[in-house]
């Protein structure tokens, strides 16, 4: 079974690591974590993500640049803000986002 | 006309981890109910009991306003901003997680359990500097009247958060009634009944029932028995 690929972007390395680990706790999901915009752009270009989670610390300018780039490559991509930082909200946020 | 939603206590999500017994008003951790995601900016209302000597190990948060209200017992708080504090019954604690914070919460008491409310509110701005605060409330200030315990304003009564929200506690004797006037247009109020029975307009709430009301400027609360309750006024968002 193909896993649902999720790109997680966040500036705080430990929180990013936590979010990636928690996403990967679900056997149906696979997370790729990036803390730098350029890494995220390369990862997005080379993978088929269903969902992008924007974590904490991403400046407005970066967020706009990333979202525009992602949508130009895949207009259907779902991009959501992840609130809470690897908290009890994560699974519900992803389920809601994947509902479309 | 006012819109309302009733969440009876027994319909909440429930997770018993042994050391932690938690009731979730809204989807949290393994409890996922698409009909119970949030009430406006109010995203988490967890009614937690932590066993003696147990607690939440170090874990991160970002971009969330986190409020803790101990109802019984004491919790020791430590965080990555070097804050070490004990929050007791009668206190209220607030954290703006902002760009990121790590913290732990432990019940250091070897005999007594801790009961506390864990409340999370979406912030009105992202990536703020993390901050922590706690204050001790005067219980007399909510006897038969509403006591403001949280607002958006650092200079106002209670703690403050990055959101256009106001929280009040009330401890009413049977028969006492009051009117609550909403502070901001577009806000709604989630009422969580801590004990006893109250009536909000015509709706009876029993212990631990929750009731959301919006598209209104005011409502009436009446204590049907001696009762304690929490009002959380928050923006209703989109």
Image: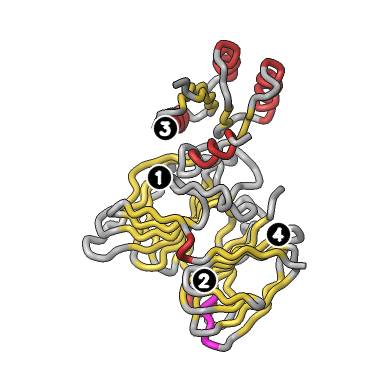
Residue beneath label 4, please? B187
What is the magenta range? Answer: B170-174
Pointer 1 chain: B
Distance Cα–Cα, label 3 vs label 2: 35 Å
Q: Are marks 3 and 2 on the same chain?
A: no
Disc 3 residue crowd, few under 14, some 14–19, many 20+, Cα 10 Å: few
Disc 4 residue crowd, few under 14, some 14–19, many 20+, Cα 10 Å: many
Distance Cα–Cα, label 4 vs label 2: 19 Å
Q: Position of residue A31 (x, y in %)?
A: 47, 25
Disc 2 residue crowd, few under 14, some 14–19, many 20+, Cα 10 Å: many
Pointer 3 chain: A
Nearer-N-terminus badge (4/1)? 1
The image quadrant where one finds the N terminus of chain B is: bottom right
- The answer to whether mark 3 and mark 4 are in CB contact below 8 A is no
Secondary structure type for disc 3: loop
Kindly give the residue lying farthest to the bottom in the view shown: B175
């Amino acid at each position: 079974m193909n896993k649902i690929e999720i790109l997680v972007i966040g500036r705080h390395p430990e929180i990013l690591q936590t979010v990636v680990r928690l996403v990967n706790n679900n056997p149906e999901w696979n997370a790729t974590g990036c803390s730098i915009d350029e890494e995220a752009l390369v990862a997005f270009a080379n993978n088929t993500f269903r969902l992008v989670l924007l974590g904490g610390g991403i400046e407005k300018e970066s967020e706009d640049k990333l979202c525009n780039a992602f949508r130009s490559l895949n207009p259907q991509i779902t991009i959501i803000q992840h609130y809470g930082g690897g908290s009890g909200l994560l699974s519900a946020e992803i389920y809601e986002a994947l509902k479309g | 006309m006012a819109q309302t939603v009733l969440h009876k206590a027994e319909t909440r999500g429930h997770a018993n981890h042994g050391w932690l017994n938690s009731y979730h008003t809204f989807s949290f951790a393994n409890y996922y109910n698409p009909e119970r995601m949030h009430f406006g900016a109010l995203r988490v209302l967890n009614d937690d009991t932590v066993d003696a000597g147990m607690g939440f190990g170090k874990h991160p948060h970002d971009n969330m306003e986190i409020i803790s209200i101990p109802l019984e017992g004491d919790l020791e708080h430590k965080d990555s901003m070097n804050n070490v504090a004990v929050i007791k019954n009668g206190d209220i604690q607030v954290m703006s997680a902002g760009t990121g914070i790590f913290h732990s919460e432990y019940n250091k008491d070897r005999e007594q359990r801790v009961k506390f409310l864990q409340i999370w509110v979406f912030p009105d701005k992202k990536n703020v500097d993390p901050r922590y605060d706690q204050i001790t409330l005067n219980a007399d200030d909510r006897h038969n009247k509403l006591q403001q315990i949280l607002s958006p304003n650092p200079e106002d009564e209670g703690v403050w958060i990055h959101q256009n929200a106001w929280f009040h506690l009330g401890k009413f004797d049977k028969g006492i009634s009051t009117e609550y006037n909403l502070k901001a247009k577009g806000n709604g109020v989630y009422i969580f009944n801590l004990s006893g029975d109250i009536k909000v307009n015509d709706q009876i709430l029993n212990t631990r029932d929750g009731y959301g009301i919006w598209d209104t400027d005011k409502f009436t609360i009446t204590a049907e028995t001696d009762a304690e309750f929490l009002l959380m006024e928050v923006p209703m968002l989109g």
